[in-house]
Amino acid sequence: MVVIHTTSKLYNTLHDVMENIKPVMQKQLVSITTKVDNANSFAFYQAGTTNQGTRFYWASADRTLTLVGIGETVAFESDDNGFDAVHHSFGQLLENAAIYNDYEASGTGPIAFGGFAFDPLKEGSVTWGDFPNSSMVIPTYLLTIVHQESYLTINALVEPGESLEPYIAQSVQFMESTFQREQMPYLIQQEEVAPEEWKQIVKDATEDIKRGVIDKVVLAREMIATFSENIPISSLLNVLSEQQHQSYIFAFERGMSCFVGSTPERLVKVEQRSLLSTCLAGTISRGQTQEEDEQLGSYLLHDEKNLQEHDFVVQMIKQAVELCCDDVVVPDGPILYPLRNLQHLYTPVKGKLQQGYTILDVVQRLHPTPALGGYPVEASIEFIRDKEPFHRGWYAAPIGWFDPKDNGEFAVAIRSALLYQNQATLFAGCGVVEDSQPEVEYEETAIKFSPMLQALGGLQ
């Protein structure tokens, strides 16, 4: 059990802050940030169980930033991938907002967190019924842990004469909670969905590539795991954080569903106009010994199929970044990016974001990268839309956050699952090029199911 060491000092601190807030003359967003004693992110998330359906969790791959949101003050949602609409609505809301934040800490204040669908043109599905094609949320209560310092933000739409006392009391209750790691329920059934059909789709893709219809396509498949009880999300996040170092840990709840994952793939990060995107494509397993691990890594670094797949991604991201950045820098070749279960080819792309562009502009230009869709983009997405026998929803799409200063970070939502009560729908994909073999690609996706399966306690 982990205890958050918070006393009535927080209650008094919040009251002191409230005394300096000017009365509102009309309905207005009021955002108040204060520094708090060291907090436990899993305890805070777990404390918001009564707000299930309106919580989110985010931990950066290097664990320097953790965000936990409870409650929904404002939601920007659309049935389209409304990047422009989200940014416009966010800006309009902030024009009349009262923001009380004396800190320069990243991820504090009225941030927006959420994500987008992989393909908004794909017909809807029951599985993703709780998720619109785009949803970015300003949480009512936000815990930010950045460089081991903790901050609490309250975001409220306040009416004239409305007391903020209920927000203070609720914040203290969340902060004074303790984390109790629950036992994961046991697995009842684990089913791979239509594996032979999927292998045939891989074969169809290679034939289209040989005919010049597409150059590369990324094909995904599903696995459905059923458990004895509802899956405790806060405990699952805790397990993922312990097991999957160098991966982003995320969860986003809508209605009765929760999209959760541990992805190694950054789409883009912007901090004070400095931009970083990463190309992560080309995959092989980890070895059982150091010698085997090094042999596998060396093979990956020299394998023509994986290098070709990786270069597709590098060239596309470089071109997209050059359209909105100055001083773009790309290394000559990839290096290895090792994870617990897998190792990938990795190339960073850096630049300076030009004035007039926002992080959402970059997200829109980058999504979907050839690492998640294929190349050419439109032709590969059309192939996926027509051939894949399931709806990707938010899988392989951007998920992340941004703040009023256009700082923020988005990852690509892979190594993920959609949870609904006692059922988890897992997703995994792989890049298909001309010489891809269906059985080999099938085995690669099986490996990519491992991070989430292991955390859930499923069969490997």
Image (tube, rainbow, N blue to C red):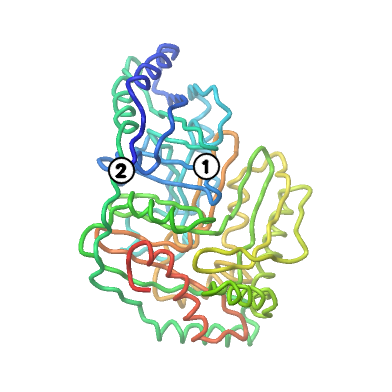
Q: Residue at x 58, y 28 (%)?
A: 104
Where is residue 185? Give x, y as percent: 24, 61
Left or right: residue 160 versus residue 241 is: left
Quadrant of the image containing the C terminus: bottom left
Q: Is residue 226 above or below residue 358?
A: below
Q: Which residue is mark 2?
A: 1
Question: Which numbered tag is attached to residue 142?
Answer: none
The disc, 2 or 1, on the residue closer to the chain's N-terminal end is 2
Q: Give the distance between the C-alpha atoms of the residues marked 2 and 1, in whole angstroms.
A: 22 Å
Q: Nearer the viewer, residue 386 or 321?
A: 321
Which residue in the rendered view is the most extreme toward the left?
A: 228
Q: Nearer the viewer, residue 177 or 256?
A: 177
Q: Residues within 10 Å of mark 1 (few under 14, many from 20)?
A: some
Amino acid type, mark 2 = Met
Where is residue 388? Give x, y as percent: 44, 75
Quadrant of the image containing the N terminus: top left
Q: Nearer the viewer, mark 2 or mark 1?
A: 2
Q: Residue at x 41, y 35 (%)?
A: 39
Q: Quadrant of residue 314?
A: bottom right
Q: Nearer the viewer, residue 85 or 62?
A: 62
Amino acid type, mark 1 = Leu
Q: Nearer the viewer, residue 89 or 240?
A: 240
Please say whether residue 25 is visible from this viewpoint: no
What secondary structure is marked by label 2?
loop
